[in-house]
Image (cartoon, rainbow, N blue to C red):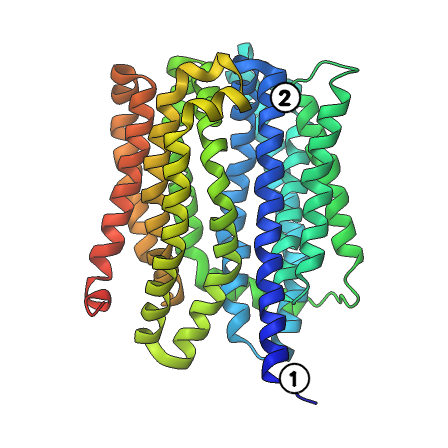
Amino acid sequence: MHLSISTTKNLFKNTTLLVYTDQLVVSGLSFLSSIIMARLLGVQGFGIYSIAWLGVLIASSVNQPFIISPMMTLSGKKTTEEKDRYLQALVFKQIFFAAALSILSFLTVLVMSVILKEWKVNSIILAFPLAVFSFLLQDFFRKYYFIIGKPQKAVLIDVIAYGGVLLSAFCLHYFRDMDAQFILLLTALFFLYASLVALLSLKKLQFNLNEIKSALSEHWDFSKWLTATALLQWFSGNLFIIAAGAILGPKAVGATRMAQNIVGITHVLFLAMENIIPARAATAQKNGGTEALFRYLWKFTMQMGAITFTLLGLITIFSKQIIDVCYGESYLEYQHVLIGFCLLYVIVFLGYPLRYAIRTLENTRLIFMSFIFSSVFSVACAYPVINAFGLNGVVAGLMMTQLITLGVYVWSLRDKIRWL
């Protein structure tokens, strides 16, 4: 029995709507959570929590290219039967990998508690690894359910995870003081619960060691450059923030995090793009070759760029009012940081279609090379730039790292995009 063309279009529209609804849930609840945490913890406390959360993002930056990005691209190139076996193997691979990274996180806290005794790192020795494990699992399952055509389940587990952290933090602050350790424990609890809901909802799941080995080999061939790139990307992009904390103190990190959270509303678009564009780009190349791929990416850039740039422009115009309403007067002195991040995110967006093209063409070594250049810049310039220009130097440094990677992408693809 075949679906009619109109029915197929309706299914596609419904799926697309759920994708954007999910990203709205994630970004919206994350945004509200950051506001509540920033108000409860203050600039100093919020900065300390933000530094701890960077560790979770390090683990995610490795997990994304090693498991999730290959899954989003390679699953679209498989037959139905191959795809089913492949995705089942990835569930077990993700559980093992998340456990390994959580153990590594535990050992990292042990080492850092000796090096940075005054930061009292040992207070998160259990909360941090648990947050890493649960966050990676939940992020995997939300993408998994999009791949298997059940976006409503992805929305559900995101509501459980992000909504649970938000509501519990808001309610419990009436009964106890909030600190980084307790918020990380709340994150671990609700993200783990969401992951268990996702895991138990899978009707058919079989352990097949050969399939797991096959998926591991396939992902390594695809993502060996992406995984190394992720570490370089995180290092080049966050070194300025880490240096800001070391040179300027936790308040600088809190101010930077405030700006990131506000412009992070664009992640509704960015994350939805990550869920949709790689698979469609792969399909476009499969059906029409490289020319069809770049035609599709050009159309995507024009459409999503108009929305993204308009949103960033509005944030810039009303930056003072947004900070005052969301974070309070104590954050108003950092208005210039927010405006700088709006300009930064213009550059960030422009890198997405070029990166999708490189990934679809499976020439991910180019991405790796781009972040080598940006990492070299970060190592060479982070300390002197921040020491000389303070928070303005942080924003300027982040812009330069993005411009460097963007320049490498454009130069490498110049022959393929010249016809545009």
The disc label shown at residue 294, or none: none
Judging depth in this view, the residue of 209 and 129 nearest the camera is 129
Percent across and percent down for residue 267 are: 49, 44
On screen, residue 358 above or below 48: below
Crowding around mark 2 (Cα neighbors within 10 Å: few <14, some 14 to 19, many 20+) is many
Residue 246: x, y in percent?
41, 17
Q: Position of residue 11 (x, y in %)?
A: 63, 71
| Observer able to see residue 254 | yes
Residue at numbered disc 2: 180
Q: Name the kind of residue labelled 1 in the image.
A: Leu
Foreground disc of the pair 1, 2 = 1
First reached walking from the N terminus: tag 1 or tag 2: 1
> Does any portion of residue 364 appear in the rendered image?
no
Tag 2: amino acid: Ala
State the CA–CA distance, disc 1 to disc 2.
51 Å
Residue 364 or residue 261, whichever sits in front: 261
- The residue drawn where x is 24% and y is 62% is 413
